[in-house]
């Protein structure tokens, strides 16, 4: 059975959803997106996703497609229409349809707003229990990784390289320092139980899960250092993990074939996943 998706005001079957070939999302990746996870039919960290959406729109001088109240209503209706208990809601806004030109079209161009749901086993994901193996790849993305655009080809290439090498994902590196994962934020836990993750800049996306997980770490009285960390620090860490909306906290057990800690998911990572999920469920709407 096909899904119900949302496109520019209508809830329709996925096969009936059509976007113009002149849409700037298609021609220029002139589009931004958000992914919100859904647990027990409820949206996780939704207000924070909207906040980041507004920032992305503002950085690109893109119009709001509709107000926040309406966006929440669309998300909820879509979750209900697809009877989504566990998975994600994907929302994309493009600058809209215009003749091809590098210059943005005039402000009358209507943004395209598209949403769909995807069922996923987020809680019982094997990667959460077993941890993931990653490789390190030189970060060749553009310089505005702080904006959540649909321009994801380098992330895709890097994931394919990881897959070809028989591992799960990659961390992207500049000047010997870890920026973030291809689709997640990257962390290490030192032998003194200090959590280290790169500070917010245009080199990384400010993850919604990152914000929430760092709050959980504070609650657990763990020390947090937001700073660049080196390849050497990463390989010699006691633990490593990644965070994202669809994977929550996922342990990293191997970096470039070097076992991290015991080579099993670490205690701090597992505890943070547990606490994050508890807190996320409390604020789910
Ligand atoms: N960095 C990148 C490059 C990402 O694609 C993502 C996932 N969208 C994240 C970090 C994590 O962000 P969030 O916790 O908001 O999913």
Image (cartoon, grey):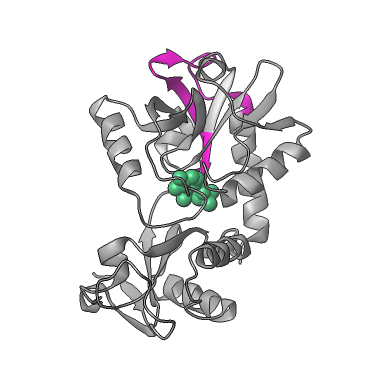
Q: Nearer the viewer, residue 131 or 68?
A: 68
Question: Quick check: 130 above or below 44?
Answer: above
Query: How many numbered circles are shown?
Result: 0
Residue 33 in the figure: left or right of residue 233? left
The stretch drawn in magenta includes residue 134:
no
Q: Position of residue 143 (x, y in %)?
A: 46, 45
Q: Position of residue 61 (x, y in %)?
A: 50, 69
Quarter holding the N terminus?
bottom left
Quarter holding the C terminus?
bottom right
Q: Position of residue 172 (x, y in %)?
A: 43, 32
Figure quadrant of residue 2: bottom left
Q: Nearer the viewer, residue 202 or 102?
A: 102
Question: Quick check: 277 above or below 271?
Answer: below
Q: Which residues are magenta?
A: 242-268
Q: Is residue 51 visible?
A: yes
Question: Quick check: 69 above or below 178?
Answer: below
Residue 223 in the figure: left or right of residue 195? right
Question: Quick check: 65 above or below 177?
Answer: below
Q: Nearer the viewer, residue 233 or 48?
A: 233
Q: Is residue 122 visible?
A: no
> What's the residue at 62%, 55% (across, down)?
281
């Amino acid at each position: 059975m096909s899904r119900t998706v949302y496109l520019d005001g209508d809830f329709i079957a996925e096969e009936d959803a059509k976007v113009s070939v002149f849409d700037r999302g298609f021609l220029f990746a002139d589009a931004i997106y958000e992914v919100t996870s859904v647990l027990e039919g409820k949206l996780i960290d939704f207000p924070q996703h909207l906040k980041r959406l507004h920032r992305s729109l503002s950085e690109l001088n893109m119009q709001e497609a509709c107000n926040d109240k309406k966006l929440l209503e669309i998300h909820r209706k879509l979750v209900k229409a697809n009877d989504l208990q566990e998975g994600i809601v994907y929302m994309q806004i493009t600058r809209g349809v215009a003749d091809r030109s590098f210059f943005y079209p005039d402000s009358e161009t209507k943004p395209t707003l598209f949403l769909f749901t995807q069922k996923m086993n987020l809680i019982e994901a094997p990667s959460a229990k077993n941890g993931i193996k990653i490789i390190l790849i030189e970060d060749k993305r553009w310089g505005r990784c702080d904006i959540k655009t649909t321009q994801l080809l380098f992330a895709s290439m890097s994931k394919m390289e990881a897959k070809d090498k028989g591992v799960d994902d990659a961390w992207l590196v500049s000047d010997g320092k870890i920026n973030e994962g291809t689709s997640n934020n990257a962390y290490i836990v030192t032998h003194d139980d200090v959590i280290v993750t790169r500070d917010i800049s245009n080199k990384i996306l400010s993850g919604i899960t990152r914000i929430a997980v760092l709050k959980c770490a504070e609650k657990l009285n763990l020390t947090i250092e937001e700073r660049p960390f080196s390849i050497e620090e990463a390989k010699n860490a006691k633990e490593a993990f990644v965070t994202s909306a669809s994977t929550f906290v996922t342990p990293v057990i191997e970096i470039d074939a070097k076992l991290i800690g015991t080579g099993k998911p670490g205690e701090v990572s597992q505890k943070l996943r547990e606490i994050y999920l508890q807190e996320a469920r409390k604020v789910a709407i």
